Amino acid sequence: MYLKAKEWNVRVHHRDGEASGDRETATEDEGGLTTRKEAETALADALSELGCGSYLEPTRKTVQEYFTEFLAGKIPQLRPGTVKTYKWLINYHIIPKLGQIPLAKLTPQHLVSMYDKLRVENNLSPQTINHVHKVIHDGLATAMRHELIHRSVASLVQPPKVQKPQLTVWTDEQLVQFLEYAKPSRYYMIILLAATCGLRRGEAIALRWKDVDLKAGTITVCQSFSRGERGHTFQEPKTKAGIRTIALPQITIDAIKRQKILLAQDKLAAGAKYNDYGLVSQTRNGSPVNPYLFERQWLEMLRKSGSPKIRFHDLRHTHASLLLKQNVNPKIVSERLGHASVSITLDRYSHTYGVDYNAAKELDCLLKYY
């Protein structure tokens, strides 16, 4: 155990039991430790592992070599959009910053330094740096399971704290005013599905006519038009709870009936050029609505209507907030949103309840002495 360049290092010499004659020795090093205590712990761990025969021969792969292999093995397990994110994080951030370091010699300080550089030099947000950390943590945990390393330094490092975003929602008056303004728009149906059913943008764009039951007054969410490796693709919801049947208010039922007429007119006008995807909301030639084009139109409608600026996704939050303020059972709201657990709904929208004066009044009634 020795100090070099202000870093503690541990070197262990031991006999290689598989070497010829059991006489050959091997040397294992661990460096980059920031304190003497860390070095003492690493030395004790190495000696203990050698003594009980559980010592792992460190891999000679670099971070670049390992994470390139890790990504190839991970791709079949991921959704197309997540594959794109993993590739970007690994190829543009992890490998350029850590690639030449031997995987077995990766230290907590390497990650701390990397996160600082990503924040200062690359101007990445705490949220994005957290994504980088999660991928590193995933990769090193896999390396541990495959017995390539004996510990994951990612578990010893805290990524930057991400501030919980403040939800911005409309009041019922603001929502009604905007819906009235948006009614003539081709994108009205997508907006209405988010506002009255809590659908995400991709779910509203991907809603098919076969998922609509006007007789029962319901729609069933079965797919989403989501980001893939190249462009957008139709994908199943991420969780089982995402596949759900939602009761429609009358305003949405009426709009869906009008939408049938609009699309029939489009089909007649386009003739043979119409490529029908069977979606409730389509372009004039029958194709799915481009999410990026829709986003531009959404911002333009906000500007022209004079409504308070919110993200399109905040219509979903508005939907949930308005229902909870009307004392709709949180379990029902959770099911409409497709949350995996009602606790997610309660945690995310607890602010909508405000100060519960009614609870105080009820306690007064219960505890009142006559």
Image (cartoon, rainbow, N blue to C red):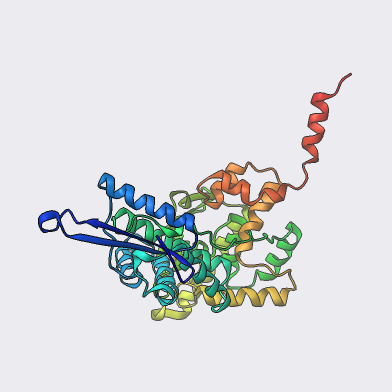
At x 44% / y 75%, what residue is drawn?
97
From the viewer's side, name the closer residue of 253 and 112.
112
**Quarter assignment of residue 23:** bottom left
In the image, 36: left or right of 144? right
In x, y percent, where is residue 119?
56, 73
In x, y percent, where is residue 168?
69, 61
The quarter of the image holding the C terminus is top right
Residue 89 visible at all: yes
In the image, 305: left or right of 150? right
The quarter of the image holding the N terminus is bottom left
Q: Residue furthest right?
A: 370
**Quarter assignment of residue 150:** bottom left
Callout count: 0
Compared to 266, does 44 lie above or below? above
Residue 208 visible at all: no
In the image, 98: left or right of 362? left
At x 38% / y 54%, what residue is drawn?
43
In x, y percent, where is residue 108?
46, 62
In x, y percent, where is residue 125?
58, 70
Q: Residue furthest top?
A: 370
From the viewer's side, name the closer residue of 279 and 32.
32
At x 35% / y 69%, what residue is drawn?
63
From the viewer's side, name the closer residue of 103 and 184.
103
In the image, 69: left or right of 172? left
